[in-house]
Image: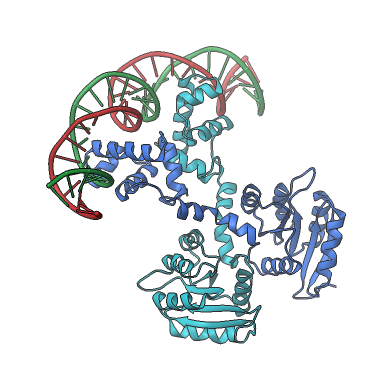
Chain colours: A blue, B cyan, C red, D green
Amino acid sequence: MKRKGDISVILVDNHPLVLEGLRAVLETYEHIKVVGTAEAVQAGLDISTRQSPDIVLLDINMPQISGIDAIELFKGAAPSTKVLMLSMHDSREYISASVLKGASGYILKDVPNEEIVRAIETVAAGGTYFSTGVSEVLLQQRRKQDNDPLPITAREREILTHLAMGRSNRDIAGLLNLSVATIETHRKTIKRKLGVSTTADLTRIAIEHGLTSAG
Amino acid sequence: MKRKGDISVILVDNHPLVLEGLRAVLETYEHIKVVGTAEAVQAGLDISTRQSPDIVLLDINMPQISGIDAIELFKGAAPSTKVLMLSMHDSREYISASVLKGASGYILKDVPNEEIVRAIETVAAGGTYFSTGVSEVLLQQRRKQDNDPLPITAREREILTHLAMGRSNRDIAGLLNLSVATIETHRKTIKRKLGVSTTADLTRIAIEHGLTSAG
DNA sequence: AGCGTTCTACCCACTACTGGGTAGAGGCCC
DNA sequence: GGGCCTCTACCCAGTAGTGGGTAGAACGCT
């Protein structure tokens, strides 16, 4: 029986073998209760609606409905349920998509059992869990900023920031008390150095390098 | 003494009281060894260089050098060290900045002791830890996309995507086999609907809503 | 049938940006 | 003291985008 303090979990994976393996691992932990397993998203949703589990361990590769799309369905079926994705891939697209859809964590299938348990505990406690390789992917933007600083001068960076915020050459000239011609020259130099030709490109690069934010 | 499997931690906070409180809490756990404490970033760096701890627990509000800037310094002083931020604020700016600079986690000072320990264990194991309120903030972009869909038509969204990728009206006209005038009309309509007037604004909105990515 | 919306396309005058130059003043390095 | 870079600023001709219109064809809804 599930007792107070226990964590209820349902497992959704289209491979019966993985399902049984996970159940066997998790059952060795007293405070984790596997209250259901399903080999298809729809069956999982039915269980989830009835049981409102603390955690859904969801395989990302599901036939019919993809695991990514299923995240929202599970959140809809039982709003208090946290979704923890289980995947064989550490591809950036999957991870970002999972986070955007509201998953609380993303772990790889080849991690040690203890890490799966740790992830379940962490997510149940209201945290997020992304396993080793995955956090590297999430922090990828940082590496880009570190390893690949923009090859432009400080003044040019300043101009670029204004440009990316939607200001015209004339606006910037006014702000910085410079001639419009000067801003145009800077703009040309920046474009040449960065190898782009449009304002949209400049804006994307500025956001990418943290000079301004999208939101 | 630190033994194999133990987690070595140094604490950096400019409040001696917090420092002592943390030390007292962590010392009740056998596998966590506090190998140093510092009330200033520079002193913390000195310790970190000598000890190469597994974890630096770093207060975000430090005088002189901000905790955010200190993240990079600690990563530089001992590359294998993971930085776990400790903060009283769950503001979006702090959290994003921390993640971008390379912090492996962000926890609030008012969380229960067990959560701090859990965070330390998780980060030491190579994961990331963001406590309850914090993960909400990280998932904020998702909410923006869900609650605030762009009030434009599918065709306009398509045009917007191309614009944000740096394509000119003429390029897009060519791609979609339309007249340049049509693209200009769409562009005007999109700007009016979104209440902006420049390409940079369009690009920022497109990225914000996931139509294209910054990188 | 009548209405609203979307997608398409054009007109016009105006402004902004582009891409090719050149160039002087000041700072830094060797 | 000569060389290199940065920041400033201008010239010019050309192209692109702006912001104000209008408008027809197609579609769905009632």
Total marks placed: 0
Q: Is residue A70 above or below residue A133?
A: above
Q: Is residue B130 above or below residue A178?
A: below
User: Which residue is more in the foreground, B43 or B87?
Assistant: B43
Image coordinates for residue B11, horizontal then vertical, percent = 50, 79
Q: Is residue C12 left or right of residue C26?
A: right
Q: Is residue B104 visible?
A: yes
Q: Which quarter of the image is occupied by the N terminus of chain B?
A: bottom right
Q: Which residue is pictured at 50% across the width and 22% down the height?
A: B173
Image coordinates for residue A137, horizontal then vertical, percent = 59, 54
Q: Is residue A32 left or right of residue B126?
A: right
Q: Please tell me in which quadrant of the rendered image residue A16 appears.
A: bottom right
Image coordinates for residue A199, horizontal then vertical, percent = 40, 36
Q: Is residue A115 above or below residue A16?
A: below
Q: Please tell me in which quadrant of the rendered image residue B123 appears.
A: bottom right
User: Which residue is more in the foreground, B207 or A61?
Assistant: A61
Q: Which residue is pictured at 50% across the width and 44% down the height?
A: B214
Q: Which residue is pictured at 51% across the width and 34% down the height?
A: B160
Q: Is residue C21 above or below residue A182?
A: above
Image coordinates for residue D18, horizontal then vertical, percent = 37, 30
Q: Is residue B195 visible?
A: no
User: Which residue is more in the foreground, A124 or D8?
Assistant: D8
